[in-house]
Amino acid sequence: MNVVIFGPPGAGKGTQAQNIVKKFNLHQVSTGDLLRTEIKNKSEIGKEIEEIISKGDFATDDIVNKLIKNIIFDPQKKNKLIFDGYPRSLNQAKNLDLLLESSNQKIDFIFFLNVNKDTIIKRIERRKILEKRSDDDLNTILKRYDTYMETTKPVLDFYSKNPNFYEIDGSEKIEVISSKIEQIITL
Ligand code: AMP
């Protein structure tokens, strides 16, 4: 089973992805984490990524698609993937379909965590204090939200036509969202 979980920054994708990973024994693929690892390793590409992320912009599709490819073709992770924060653009969504198809896989469930801007701002402010993430100052948050609306909206339109697309109210409590997702998966 492969799962895509997406929604605006601060919607709780990471938290829900971790829960699904534990319950269904999947591998979490967070492009945010992959990008932060490159930054930490101070690789050439990492320096480029740092500049982009600190401005609240998205990494280029090229960079992200490269990072994702190795994971999809890893035989140990085949059909055990949960994508968190990817795809974030129509190009990435189409690239994901192509990569999965060429490795004989598909997406079984697509979850869209829907939350409004006010809830997201409050949550990210809290996360900023807890995790001290450098990209989380308020201006960056607003920029990230706007970037999300602009770039990820076409992904939503693309996926919402899919029969295995599920929209979930992301403003509910963590446990409530988790149990809704588990119910859908185990149905
Ligand atoms: P996240 O941890 O998912 O909130 O990601 C943190 C930042 O990494 C985002 O604000 C983007 O700048 C960048 N990022 C993460 N995933 C992607 C992606 N799939 N495509 C482009 N940029 C990404």
Image (cartoon, rainbow, N blue to C red):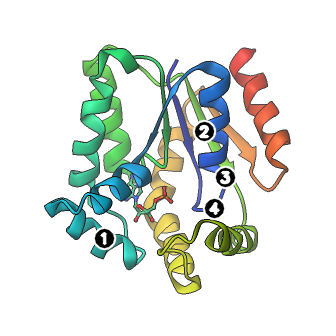
Q: Residue at x 69, y 53 (%)?
A: 114
Find out whether the residues at labels 3 and 4 contact each other: C-beta distance under 8 Å: yes
Per the image, the residue denoted by label 3 is 12
Q: Which mark is residue 10?
A: 4
Whether the residue under disc 1 has CB within 8 Å of ligand 1: no
Q: Is residue 165 above or below residue 93?
A: above
Q: Position of residue 13 (x, y in %)?
A: 61, 48
Q: Which mark is residue 163?
A: none
Within 10 Å of disc 4 (Cα), the crowding (few <14, some 14-19, many 20+) is many
**Nearer to us: label 1 or label 3:** 1
- The secondary element bearing badge 1 is classed as helix
The earlier-in-sequence mark between 2 and 4 is 4
Per the image, the residue denoted by label 2 is 17
Closer-to-camera residue (151/170): 170
Find out whether the residues at labels 1 and 3 contact each other: C-beta distance under 8 Å: no
The earlier-in-sequence mark between 2 and 1 is 2
Per the image, the residue denoted by label 1 is 50
Q: Residue at x 56, y 79 (%)?
A: 142
Whether the residue under disc 3 has CB within 8 Å of ligand 1: no
The three-letter code of the residue at mark 2 reads Ala
- The secondary element bearing badge 4 is classed as loop
Alpha carbon separation for disc pair 2 and 1 = 24 Å
Quadrant of the drawing holding the C terminus: top right
Is residue 115 in sight in this rendering?
yes
Q: Residue at x 59, y 83 (%)?
A: 138
The number of callouts visible is 4
Q: Position of residue 154 (x, y in %)?
A: 46, 54
